[in-house]
Amino acid sequence: MATTRISGYRPGLVDLAAGQISREIFVNDEIYREELERVFARAWLFVGHESQIPSPGDFFVSSMGEESVILCRDRAHKVHVFLNSCRHRGMKVCRYDEGNAAVLTCPYHGWSYSTDGRLVGVPYFREAYHGTLDRSAWGLVEVAQSYLYKGTVWATWDPAAPPFLEYLGDFLPYIDLTLDSWDGSDGGTEILCGIQKWRVPCNWKFPAENFSGDSYHNISHRSVDLVGIGPSGSGRRDMPELNMARKLHIAFPERGHQTTSYLLPREAAPPPAYQQSSVVSDYFRECEEARRRKRGDWGRMITLVGETFPNTAYLARQPRTLAAWHPRGAHETEVWRWFLVDKSAPAEVKDFLRDYYIRYSGPGGMTEQDDMENWNYAHSASRGTIARRYPYSYEQGLGAEVENYEWEGFRVPGTVCDLTQAKSSEHNLRNFYRRWAEFMAAGSWDELMHWRRPARAEAAE
Amino acid sequence: MSEPVNIRQIAPGTKIALVDGALAEVVSNPADGVWVFARYLSSPDDPARVGSEDMIFAQDILEIRDSSE
């Protein structure tokens, strides 16, 4: 795999049979430019959370790939996602991170748009344009599709992309484990405070891979474990129930999504947690008992981390966050992290979680600092002419994954690699890159929707 | 030549004279420094606009008039 002259993506850079992936896909600028077109202009991307724009006129400037976009709520309460670029000369229409506006006015020449995207203000419309400019043809560019799911807002530029829920497929219940209230009620989460944004000098796929389920790098968090940043003052988390659970890598090969989750025994009672505050401890004990009653076997599932292809990551508990890995060139990633809490939780619970979350995640979070250091130096040490000749190894657990995994009466959706004894695998990471390679090779969404093919074949007959 | 008007400070109810000779009353102000929403009170060039609301561009505002006018 000596690939020193790569002028763009070529099949073979991702060799899943051998468990090897070329460093070129992380450090090559031309591959990056193709990625923007083939991955980020096609896939469903996480844009923001409805709780950031509760009122008509509220807007939040987000990102899709390298594109700046405006997430806003119009006067009729409908949520929109627009390209943040004036149709006249391309100036950013919104330069604030968030706010409220009756109209979105471009500061360059003054073209102005209503919050539903229509061009409503054109300076010298009658004089300079003689009243002939077709304003209806010059509204803000809107995404091809958008979807609201339990407070989260998603969008894609590609009209041929499948509907959002079909894009997720059987991965949906794992996302619910992050977005539902702690007691198992549908939805009910909100963003805690603002979001954190920072830049890391690495390719966006380093964090995406990490949150797909890199179960091998725990050693790099050893110092955090020793310091004891967890909610009860020891370790990183306060989840003793994981010691009695099956630790699973769960992947969805046709979709590119994956998670590291734990399946609890059928009869396991929730152990005590958050013992430093009786209010917080009582809240979580009651919620956890309710969750297990409501959700049946799904109440036994605890998601640790997950990644929706391509660039949205989850931590479902301790801390409970969403992250987007925004590409800013082949060699830089802008990380945005949203922190979630139950909207109905007591203020003391939210305050407690805020303190814990910022100890753990974000640019000042101790665990995330460990990760950033790894991604940063792995990237820079892979850019050299010599370094990029040598592929990375992704051989852990090759051939060890199973379909129809079942434990104590619960059949787990997805292909599963049981890590309980194996400790680690790279099953999920291979799954991420399999889908990435498919996106890079495919000419259209038609080639990416494998799951529709049997139905098509039947229809043809 | 009139001084430029700082339109961000114009409150609803304020009357404004426009460069084309029209007079309008501000209905709301998004405070973006570029536009105000106003209702035409008179419009010598286009009498049909009287009573209608429109977005008024900052550079089309000549001056602020007394509310008694």
Image: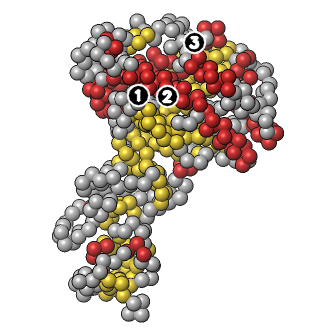
- Secondary structure at badge 1 equals loop
Residue occupied by mark 3: A424
Q: Quadrant of residue A230?
A: top right
Residue at 25 percent across and 22 percent down: it is: A8
Tag 2 residue: A372
Q: Position of residue A455 (x, y in %)?
A: 41, 23
Q: Of label 1 and label 3, which has the lower sequence position?
A: 1
Q: Nearer the viewer, residue A325 or A310?
A: A325
The residue pinned by badge 1 equals A202
Which residue is rendered at x = 31% and y = 28% of the image? A32
Where is residue A45 shown, x and y percent of the image? 43, 37
Same chain check for tags 2 and 1: yes
**Quadrant housing residue A182:** top right
The colour scheme is secondary structure
As measured in the structure, the alpha-carbon distance from the residue carrying label 1 to the one carrying label 3 is 24 Å
In the image, A119: left or right of A418?
left
Label 2: how many Cα within 10 Å (few below 14, some 14–19, many 20+): some
Label 3 with label 2: CB-CB less than 8 Å: no
Labels 2 and 1 touching (C-beta < 8 A): yes
**Chain letter of disc 2?**
A
Report the amino acid beneath label 1: Cys
The relative height of residue A61 versus residue A99 in the rendered view (above or below) is above
